[in-house]
Amino acid sequence: MKIEDVIKTATAMPLTNPSFPPGPYRFYNREYVIITYRTDMDALRAVVPEPLEVTDAIVKYEFIRMPDSTGFGDYTESGQVIPVTFDGEKGSYVHSMYLDDEAPIAGGREIWGFPKKYANPKIVHENEVLVGTLHYGSVTCVVGSMGYKHKILPPDPILHALGEPNFLLKIIPHVDGTTRICELVRYHMQDAVLKGAWSGPAALELFHHVMADVARLPVLEVIGATHFIADITLGMGEVVYDYLDPKHNVAPGASGSGAKA
C-alpha cells in the first residue's frame, strides 16, 4: 500500500478493516432510564477535572438501550454523568460508561474520548417496573429500578437537557507510554425527536468493584428518575482545552487560563 493510500484510507484501526465506519451516527428509539442522586461533594470534586466546575453534589446514573444505531448496531450502555459548568456554560461531564459492543467502545474512545469499558448493562421491563443492571463479568455493580410511566413529562425540558453541551476527557498515550493527547472535548446531541417521556419513583444501589468503580460516588439520596425514548444524532466533537498546551498550564482562574473556542 502506497503512503498516499495509507493517508487516504486511515480513518480508524485496523487500517484495512476498521472497527467502526465514519460518522455521522444516528440512533433510533434510543431508550433512557436516568436516576438522579445526591452524592458526596468531596468525592465528586476528586474525579471531575479542572477547568470544569462542580456546582452541586449531583450525579445522573444512566441506563441507555440502543436497539438501532447506524454504524454501531444494537447495544446497551450504562454510566455516570455529572452536571458541571465550563466558563459559565452549563453542561454535563461524562465520568464513566460501560457497554457490551466493541464498535462503539473503539469509536467512542478513539474519536471523542468517551470513558468506555466493556461490561454487561441491561434494561428490562418487569411488569410495572423498569430495571437497570450493570454486571462486570459475574459481579453485580449496579441495580436501579423505576416505576413504569407513572407521570407523562412535557417535552421541552427533556429536549433542552439533550441540547446542552457534554464534556469528555480524551487521553491517548504515546508509544513510549507518556501522554500524547490530553484534551477536554465538547460535543452535542443533535436533531432530537422525542417520542415520549415519563417520571416515576426510583431506587439505586452501587456496589464496589475494582474495575467498575461506580461506588466511588456513593448514593446518599435518590432525587428522581426520568424515562424517555428519542431518535437522536451524536454530533462530532471539538477540543475546548488542551492540558498539554503550555499556555493552559496555569492556575485555574488566573489570567491566560481560558479555553480555546
Image: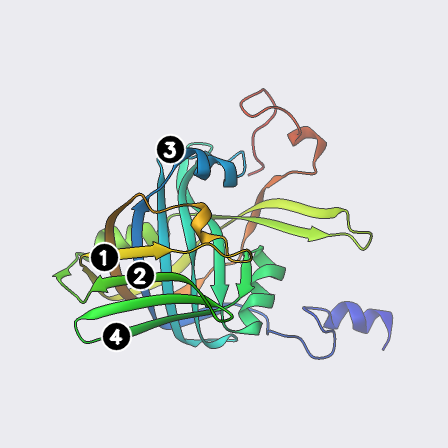
Q: Is residue 12 above or below residue 116?
A: below
Circle 4 SS class: strand
Circle 1 SS class: strand
Which residue is rendered at x = 60% and y = 67% of the image? 106
Q: Is residue 87 above or below residue 33?
A: above
Mark 4 or 3: in front is 4
Neighbourhood count class around disc 1 (C-alpha, 10 Å): few under 14, some 14–19, many 20 upward: many
Residue 55's label in the rendered image is: 3
Circles 2, 3 touching at the beta carbon (< 8 Å):
no
Residue 202's label in the rendered image is: 1
Neighbourhood count class around disc 4 (C-alpha, 10 Å): few under 14, some 14–19, many 20 upward: few
For the residue pair 85 and 140, the one nearer the viewer reads as 140
Q: Amino acid at mark 4?
A: His
For the C terminus, the image quarter is top right
Instruction: Name the spot of residue 244 as percent of width and height, x first.
Output: 70, 38
Q: Amino acid at mark 3?
A: Thr
> Mark 1 or mark 4: which comes first in sequence?
4
Label 4 to label 3, Cα distance in Å? 34 Å
Neighbourhood count class around disc 2 (C-alpha, 10 Å): few under 14, some 14–19, many 20 upward: many
> Extreme left residue here?
151
Label 1 to label 4, Cα distance in Å? 14 Å
In the rendered image, which residue does mark 4 sit on?
125
Circle 3 SS class: loop
Determine if residue 231 is in view. no
Residue 144's label in the rendered image is: 2
